[in-house]
Structures are given as structure tokens and as C-alpha cells.
Amino acid sequence: MKRIFFFLFLLVAALDSKAQEEFDSLLKKQPEDPRMNEFLITAILEYNIPQQDYADKFYGHPGLGAGFYWKSKNDLYLGADLVFFFSDRIKQTDILSNITNSLGYVIGGDGEPANIEISQRGYNLTFLRVGKLLVHSGFWHGNIHSGLVGMIGGGLFQYKYRIVDNTGTVPGLSEEYKKGYDELTNGFCLTPMLGYFYFDKKKYLNFFLAVEYRIAWTQNRRDWNFNSMERDDSLRNDQAWTIKLGWFFPIRKKQSRDYYFF
């Protein structure tokens, strides 16, 4: 009798071990379901091509920024982003004309020509973006969330001239007086965008490449412009084509797997 019980014990143990091996093998073969809600932190690199009134002041310029998005398992997007842009090349050359002499120099308090640098600084803050996957296309091992995505956003667009007196000898270019020359401009902005979003099945390579058209209704916000010696209340139509490249860093909740044995 003892031998029979011992034999039955070995048989049950062997069957249980075999079942566990088959189950572990099944887990390894079973892919993780990519249909899930997730948050995406995004690094953004862009290049802007000014249009309309914006093109009167600036050449094409780069931008760097970051965003935060929520993507549903049904490929709906909600998010916000902030991109800073800058350039050392500007089109308007008469910004300091009222303190420039006939030879084109700004003379400092020491009687010598001052070393003045003028560049562009600005940003586009998109308070809210809404988007949807329009066409699925998961080439090169892309998962089911990859494809053509359409988005539209709204926010604040702002820019100004950055003026630096490297010699520090021009009284008329103190930090307070610079505000009379920098032409700080901002206003509401719409940003429709169309791009390809790629999500890797192995989760390592996640990016987007998109084209955006920025449409901003802006106005000079300074009380007085020293260059023109008047207040500028005119409404501006600042627009730009933007080529965007972004890198996604997904924040995913680990999927739970509950199994019950009887």
C-alpha cells in the first residue's frame, strides 16, 4: 500500500511540473496587449518657416521643447506642450535707429562704438492638443497604435528681440529701456498638425514626424516703441510652417495577469 501511495505522489508531482512548464512557456509566447491607456512624455525638435507678418521680421529658425500627452487605448490624444525658439538672424535692422549715428554705430558713454547683439527669442505654449489616429500603418515592427495622426491645438504664441550690450556702456540700453526696443508681441495661436506616430512593439523606439501650421493673432504689448516714437496697436497675422520631430517616453502601467488553478 505504501508503494502505491508513493507511486501516486510521484505521478502527481510529475504532472504538476509538466503543467507548470507548459504554462510558463505559454506566458513567454503570449505578447503583451498594446491596447492600453498611457501617458507620453515627449521631447520636441522643430524648424519654423515664417509666413505672413512673421516673415517680415524673422528668417527660419529652430525650436526645442517638451510635451505631455495622454493616449487612450482607442488612439485618442489629449496633451499640452511648450517649445522655445531662437535665432541670431533677424530681418529688421533698424531697431535701434533713433540711437544710431550716421555711420551705423551706437555710441557708448565712453565715446566709443558699442558692441550690440540683436537676436530673436520666443515660445509657443499649447495649452491643449486634441488628436486621433486617422490611418493605421505599422511598418517596420510598429504596433497597432502606429500611423497617421491628426491634431489641433490652441495656446499662446510670443516673441521679441533680445538686445545685448556687450560693452555695457550705452545708458539707453539698460534693462528697463530695452523694453522700448524689444517689440514684445504675443497672442492666441491655433496649431493644426498632421504627422506619423510610430510605436515600437518592443517599446524602445517611439517617435513622431509631423508638419504643423501655426496661425497666431498677435499684438505688440509694449506701451511705447522708442524706435518709431509711438505706440503700436496694430493687429498682426503671424504664421509659420513648422516641421516637428518628437521622441516619446511612454509611462505604462504594468498589466496584471491573474491565473487561477483548480
Image: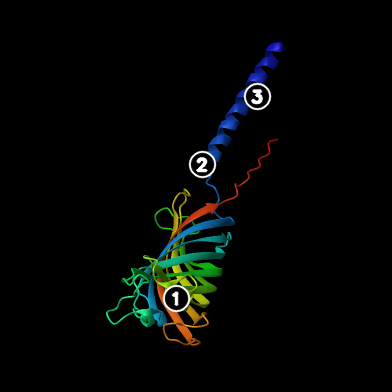
Find numbered disc 2 in the image and state the secondary structure of the residue it sits on: helix
Q: Determine whether 262 is above or below 169 in the image.
A: above
In terms of depth relative to the viewer, which is nearer, 22 or 63?
Answer: 63
Residue at position x 41%, y 76% in the image: 240
Assess disc 3: are there few (<14), some (14-19) or many (≥20) residues with their C-alpha within 10 Å of its C-alpha: few
Q: Which residue is mark 2?
A: 29
Q: Secondary structure at mark 3?
A: helix
Q: Quadrant of residue 79?
A: bottom right
The mark closer to the camera, 2 or 1, is 1
Distance from the alpha carbon under mark 1 to that under mark 3: 84 Å
> Is there a contact, CB below 8 Å, between mark 2 and mark 1?
no
Callout count: 3
- Residue 187 x, y percent position in the rendering: 52, 78
Q: Are marks 1 and 3 in contact (CB under 8 Å)?
A: no
- Disc 2 versus disc 1: distance between alpha carbons? 62 Å
Mark 2 burial class by Cα count in 10 Å: few <14, some 14-19, many 20+: few
Quadrant of the image containing the N terminus: top right
| Residue 29, image x, y percentages | 51, 41
Question: What amino acid type is highlighted by mark number 3?
Answer: Val
How far across and down, in percent of the image, does residue 180 sit?
A: 47, 78
In the rendered image, residue 204, in percent from the top left (x then y), is placed at 45, 49
Task: Give the residue type at disc 2.
Answer: Lys
Front in this rendered view, residue 17 or 43: 43
Mark number, residue 182: 1
Label at residue 255: none
Mark with earlier residue (3, 2): 3
Give me the C-alpha separation between circle 3 and circle 2: 26 Å
The mark closer to the camera, 3 or 2, is: 2
Vertical placement of 150 versus 11: above or below? below
Q: Which residue is mark 3?
A: 12
Confirm whether residue 243 shows in the render.
Answer: no
